C-alpha cells in the first residue's frame, strides 16, 4: 500500500515540477535573451564610453588652455638661447605635471608626459628628464602640426611602438604677445587597461576594448574580462564589426552572439580625425549565464516534494497497513477454524469496520452479542424504570409473592 501511495503522489509532484520548468523556460526565454534589448545595451555602452573619453579630452584641453595663459608657460619661449628655453621647458613641465596630479580633472588618469614644443613641432623639454629634447615631434604626429597651424586645442591618440608611446595626448598652442603661435604645450594621459577600466566604471560597467587601425586592427587596451572576450575582439565577428565601424564612421553591432556575448564597435570621437581608434564593447547575450541556472530552484523544490512524498507515504502506509494486515491474518485464522477469534483493534479510521466485522462473526457463529461494559457488568434495562425517576416508585414484588 505504501508504495502505491508514494508512487502516485511522487508522479504528481514530478509532473508538476517538470511542467513548471517548461512553462517558466518558455515564458522567460524572451526576457533573458532579448536580442533587440541586448543590441540596445551594446549601443548605450559604446556611446557612454565614447562620450566619457571625449569628455576627458575636452577637460584636458580646457585645463591646458587655462595654463598657457600664465607667465610661467609663456616664459618658456622667452629664453634667449635654445639651452635656456630647454631648461625652462623641463622645469615648467615638472611643475605642471605635479599640478595635474593633484587636480580632480585627472583622477585615476595622472598625466605621464608633459612636453613643450616650439612652433616647428620640435621638443624643447619634457617632465622628468632631458630626453626628447630636439625630437621632431610634429613629424611623428601630424595632428600636432595641425594644431600649431590652426592655433586651436585638440587631442589625438599617440601609438608609437618605436618611441614607446601609448597615450591620449592633448595640445594647447601658446601665443606670443602679438597673438602669433610660438609653440605648444602637450599633456598625455596613459592609454592602458586601467584607463579603460576607469571608463567602464564611470559608464556602463561592461567590457571595453580599444583598437587602432593599420595594416589590421591592433588591440591596444581592454578593461579586463576573460581571455575569450579579448580573443573575440582580435578576430571573428567582433573584429569584423570593429572594421565596419571604422569604414562606415558609425556604430556597428554583431547580429549573433559570440561566446555568449554581443559585440559592438564605434569610432573614438574627439581624437584626431575620429578614425584614429575604434572602441569595442561587449554585453552578455543573456541576462543570466544560463536559463537552467536561473530555474534550478524548480528542480530543487521538486526534489524536496518527492522526499516529503516518500516520508509521508511511508508514514501513511504504516498507519493503515498494520491494522489491515492484522485483519487479514485474523480472518485467515477464522477460516482455518479459530471461530472464537475476535478483533481487538483500536483505530480512529478503521475502528467502526472492526466492530462490524466482529458483529458479523458473532451473527454467523450464533454467538450472542456481548452487552457488558468495560468492567463486565451487563448493560440491561431496569425492571421498573420509574424506580430511577425521582425515587418514588415501589420496589418490584418478589417472585411468587
Image (cartoon, rainbow, N blue to C red):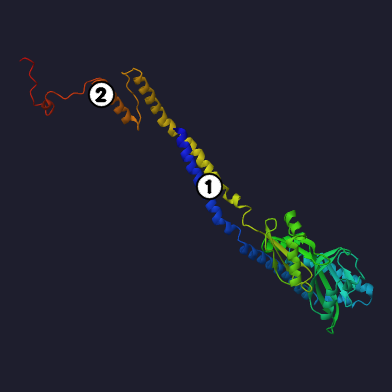
Q: Is residue 239 above or below residue 394?
A: below
Judging depth in this view, the residue of 63 and 157 nearest the camera is: 157
**In the image, what residue occupies the spot 67% across and 66% down?**
43
Q: Residue furthest left?
A: 401
**Could you say which is closer to the camera, residue 16 or residue 382?**
16
Question: Horizontally, is 387 left or right of 191 in the view?
Answer: left
The answer to which of 244 and 283 lies nearer the viewer is: 244
Residue sitting at 32 percent across and 28 percent down? 354
Observer able to see residue 240: yes
Does residue 234 lie above or below 121 as drawn?
above
- Find residue 363 and name its label: 2
Q: How many other residues sit within 10 Å of disc 2, few (<14), some (14-19) or many (≥20)?
A: few
Q: Give residue 312's position: percent from left, percent from top.
A: 46, 36
Q: Is residue 212 left or right of residue 81?
A: left
Q: Quadrant of the C terminus?
A: top left
Mark 1 falls on what kind of element? helix
User: In front: mark 1 or mark 2?
Assistant: 2
- Write down the residue under mark 1: 18
Mark nearer the N terminus (1 vs 2)? 1
Amino acid at each position: 500500500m505504501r508504495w502505491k501511495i508514494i508512487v502516485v503522489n511522487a508522479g504528481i509532484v514530478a509532473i508538476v515540477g517538470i511542467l513548471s520548468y517548461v512553462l517558466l523556460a518558455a515564458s522567460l526565454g524572451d526576457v533573458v535573451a532579448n536580442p533587440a534589448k541586448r543590441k540596445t545595451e551594446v549601443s548605450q555602452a559604446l556611446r557612454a564610453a565614447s562620450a566619457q573619453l571625449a569628455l576627458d579630452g575636452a577637460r584636458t584641453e580646457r585645463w591646458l588652455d587655462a595654463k598657457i595663459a600664465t607667465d610661467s608657460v609663456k616664459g618658456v619661449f622667452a629664453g634667449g638661447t635654445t639651452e635656456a628655453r630647454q631648461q625652462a621647458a623641463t622645469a615648467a613641465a615638472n611643475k605642471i605635471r605635479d599640478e595635474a596630479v593633484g587636480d580632480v580633472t585627472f583622477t585615476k588618469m595622472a598625466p605621464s608626459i608633459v612636453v613643450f614644443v616650439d612652433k616647428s613641432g620640435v621638443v624643447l623639454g619634457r617632465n622628468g628628464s632631458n630626453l626628447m629634447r630636439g625630437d621632431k615631434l610634429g613629424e611623428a604626429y601630424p595632428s600636432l602640426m595641425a594644431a600649431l597651424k590652426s592655433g586651436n586645442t585638440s587631442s589625438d591618440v599617440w601609438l608609437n611602438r618605436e618611441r614607446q608611446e601609448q597615450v591620449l595626448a592633448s595640445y594647447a598652442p601658446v601665443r606670443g604677445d602679438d597673438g602669433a603661435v610660438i609653440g605648444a604645450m602637450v599633456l598625455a594621459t596613459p592609454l592602458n587597461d586601467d584607463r579603460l577600466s576607469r571608463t567602464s566604471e564611470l559608464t556602463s560597467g561592461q567590457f571595453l576594448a580599444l583598437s587602432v587601425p593599420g595594416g589590421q586592427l591592433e588591440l591596444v587596451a581592454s578593461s579586463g574580462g576573460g581571455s575569450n572576450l579579448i580573443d573575440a575582439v582580435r578576430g571573428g565577428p567582433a573584429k569584423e564589426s570593429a572594421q565596419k565601424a571604422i569604414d562606415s564612421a558609425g556604430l556597428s553591432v554583431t547580429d549573433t552572439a559570440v561566446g555568449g556575448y554581443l559585440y559592438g564597435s564605434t569610432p573614438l570621437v574627439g581624437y584626431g580625425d575620429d578614425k584614429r581608434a575604434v572602441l569595442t564593447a561587449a554585453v552578455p547575450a543573456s541576462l543570466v549565464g544560463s536559463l537552467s541556472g536561473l530555474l534550478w530552484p524548480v528542480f530543487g523544490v521538486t526534489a524536496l516534494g518527492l522526499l516529503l512524498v516518500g516520508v509521508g507515504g511511508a508514514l501513511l502506509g504504516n498507519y493503515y497497513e498494520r491494522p489491515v494486515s492484522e485483519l487479514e491474518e485474523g480472518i485467515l485464522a477464522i477460516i482455518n477454524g479459530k471461530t472464537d477469534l475476535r478483533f481487538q483493534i483500536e483505530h480512529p479510521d478503521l475502528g467502526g469496520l472492526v466492530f462490524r466485522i466482529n458483529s458479523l462473526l458473532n451473527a454467523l457463529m450464533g454467538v450472542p452479542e456481548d452487552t457488558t461494559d468495560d468492567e463486565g457488568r451487563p448493560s440491561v434495562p431496569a425492571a421498573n424504570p420509574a424506580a430511577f425517576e425521582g425515587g418514588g416508585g415501589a420496589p418490584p414484588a418478589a417472585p411468587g409473592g
